[in-house]
Image (cartoon, rainbow, N blue to C red):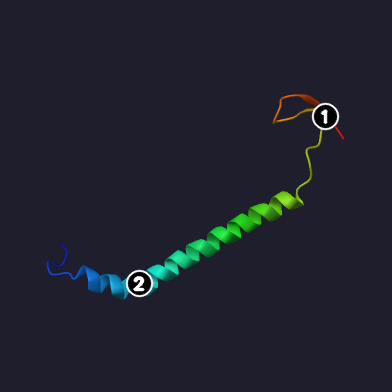
Amino acid sequence: MSAPDTNVEKEKQRHKPALTGIRLSLIVAAGLFIGFLGWAFAQSDGPEGAETQIDGRTGDAVAGE
């Protein structure tokens, strides 16, 4: 059961630093994740394999490199 005389405005002020910290940590984590994805894509090699490959954007056959 919750307290019957909770002052919501007072509790909002008391929890403001904790909620700000949580929001800031989520923003930092999202930035690190996006940075990791960018780094992973930059480090990857192109597609390898068959001499003829299919262009995913158009569906046309492209000569492999």
Residue that protrudes farthest toward the top in the picture: 60
What percent of the width, then of the height, locates residue 59?
72, 25
Q: Residues within 10 Å of mark 1 (few under 14, many from 20)?
A: few
Asked whether the residues under the numbered discs 2 and 1 touch, taking CB atoms below 8 Å apart as contact, a structural biologist would say no
Residue 14 sits in quarter: bottom left
Q: Which residue is mark 2?
A: 16
Q: CA distance from mark 2 to mark 1?
A: 57 Å
Q: Is residue 65 left or right of residue 24?
A: right
Q: Amino acid at mark 2?
A: Lys
Above or below for 4 versus 41: below
- Above or below for 31 versus 65: below
The residue carrying pointer 2 sits among few (fewer than 14), some (14 to 19) or many (20 or more) residues within 10 Å by Cα, namely few
Q: Which mark is residue 36?
A: none
- Identity of the residue drawn at 43% across and 66% down: 22
Q: Position of residue 62 (x, y in %)?
A: 81, 28
Res 50 label: 1
Q: Quadrant of the C terminus?
A: top right
Q: Tell me the amino acid under the disc marked 1.
A: Ala
Task: Identify the residue at image location x=74%, y=51%.
Answer: 42
- Residue in the picture at 76% in, 24% down: 60
Q: Secondary structure beneath disc 2?
A: helix
Q: Position of residue 21 (x, y in %)?
A: 44, 70
Look at 22% across and 68% down and name the residue there. Answer: 8
Q: Could you say which quadrant of the image residue 10 lies in?
A: bottom left
- Residue farthest left in this picture: 4
Q: Say whether disc 2 or disc 1 marks the residue closer to the N-terminus.
A: 2
Secondary element at image label 1: loop
Is residue 24 shown left or right of residue 47? left
Quadrant that contains the N terminus? bottom left
Left or right: where 47 falls relative to 11: right
Examine the rendered structure and indicate whether residue 1 appears above or below residue 15: above
* Disc 2 versus disc 1: nearer the observer: 2
